[in-house]
Image (cartoon, rainbow, N blue to C red):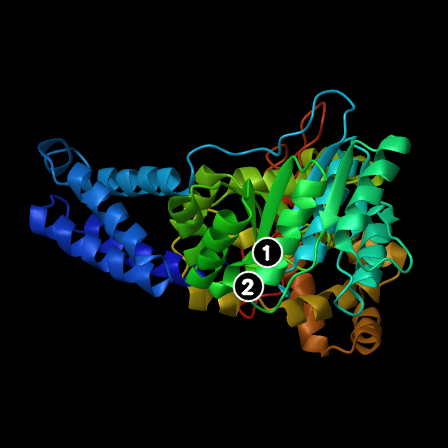
Amino acid sequence: MAFESLTEKLNNVFRRLSGKGKLTEEDVKAALREVKMALLEADVNFKVVKQFIGSIQERAVGTEVMNGLNPAQQVIKIVNEEMIRLMGSETTELSFQPGKALTVIMMAGLQGSGKTTTASKLAGQLRKKGRKPLLAALDVYRPGAIRQLEVNGDKVGVPVFTVEGNNHPVGIAKEAVAYALTNHFDTLFLDTAGRLQIDEEMMQELVDIKAAVTVHETILIVDAMTGQEAVNVAKTFDEKVGIDGVILSKMDGDTRGGAALSVKAVTGKPILYVGMGEKLEDLEQFYPDRMASRILGMGDVLTLIDKAKASMDEEDEKKNLEMGTKLKKGKFDFDDYLESMKQMRKMGGLRTIMGMMPNLGISKDDLDNAIDEKKMARIEAIVLSMTPAERANPKLLTPQRKYRIAKGSGNDIAEVNRFIKQFKQMQDMVKKMPGIMGGRKRHGNPFGALGGLGGFGGRGGRFF
């Protein structure tokens, strides 16, 4: 999970500050020394860290903070504000040509950065928003690159332009633009070739493409897991080719987060999106304020709501509204539980969801112990081993039926009994709180399908 190591260290620092009550100047300086070490260990650029800590110290060591009613909270507020400023303050959108005019976007990056997959993810998102995108395969060097783009394009419903036998990327780019204009596409993605490392030949090819066709946006994809090296790559590409923005891929695998905190400060170029998984829908728009909130353990509920809405099709929305109505009446059955699990998986799984929730004082180790995905799968198998009638009415679950369910799901009878007992407790809780977890009248509650998921599957029983 992105930033988990940095988040844990920063939370420990802030927790100690909060425990002091009134702060001295030395307390603040000592805390900032720890913050500095945490950022350096997270692979944040040294110059960026130095400037960041200096800005915080200048604001924090003052009479307004030191003598305030809650000085620790004020220090945390300053850290949050400076972190947002460090990452760009405002969200930067892709810039499109007016009307139906064609916008050409060149995707660049090193080999293995996730460039081809990211191009498909972004094209798919734009298609859902009503644009008419086209992907063009310009990587004629890497075996399988063109086929990979075709497969991904098919998955997201975006056509791919290729030229049989043409091994000249500049020529392909020209033909792609002509084809896009003739067939009334409004967005063209040029998926260019990458190399294992930066070389002059690759840079010149990108320069030649930009000279041959009008490129409106040059987007660099960098692997967030490479830390400061990702920042160095971005700086070099900007100097040699010129870039308009950066997309950080593989953020879900980077527990440090140094690249996200350094790119804007070092290159001056905004982060546009972050890749948070391997699935083609796992691409999030970058919001500096939301990212700062995640890093500081304050959660990111707005992005969680966005993910919930984006994961629902019309059928899901209908079921969501139905569940909201049932929850208002204090009803929740095993079918609702299955629907909750389905919606949770669509949103990236429980770990992703918990990573966006505000810090509830749960340590990383406790969270790891609570979230047992394998056990959750076994519990889901228990429900799937029930008949439709049993799922709708748990009162039908006699000892004989429970033994059948245990055998059918590959679980011990004790595990089946434990789950059913917990489920009944959940039902009792829902009956006592009708309306709290229901949906809104018009659009429904994006968490309606999760509202009744009371917390099954952790090693200790509950994870909420």
The x and y percentages for residue 437 are 62, 37
Please indicate whether residue 444 sits to the left or right of residue 267 in the image: right
Residue 338, disc: none
The x and y percentages for residue 95 are 62, 30
Give the labeled residue for mark 2: 198
The relative height of residue 181 versus residue 28 in the rendered view (above or below) is above
Give the labeled residue for mark 1: 203
Name the residue located 73 percent from the left edge and 47 percent from the top edge.
Answer: 190
From this viewpoint, is residue 315 visible?
yes
Name the residue located 31 percent from the left edge and 51 percent from the top edge.
Answer: 48
Q: Residue furthest top?
A: 99
Q: What is the three-letter code of the residue carrying label 2?
A: Ile
Closer to us: 417 or 454: 454
Few, some or many residues within 10 Å of mark 1 (<14, 14–19, 20+) = some
The answer to whether the residues at label 1 and label 2 have Cβ atoms under 8 Å apart is yes
The answer for how far apart the CA atoms under marks 1 and 2 are is 8 Å
Name the residue located 66 percent from the left edge and 54 percent from the top edge.
Answer: 205
Q: What is the three-letter code of the residue carrying label 1?
A: Met
In which quadrant of the rendered view does residue 391 lie?
Answer: bottom right
Q: Secondary structure at mark 1?
A: helix
Closer to us: 446 or 212: 212
In which quadrant of the rendered view does residue 363 lie?
Answer: bottom left
Few, some or many residues within 10 Å of mark 2 (<14, 14–19, 20+) = some
Q: Secondary structure at mark 2?
A: loop
Of callouts 1 and 2, which one flags the residue occurring earlier in the amino acid sequence?
Answer: 2
Closer to us: 198 or 205: 205
Please indicate whether residue 442 sits to the left or right of residue 35 in the image: right
The x and y percentages for residue 211 are 66, 42
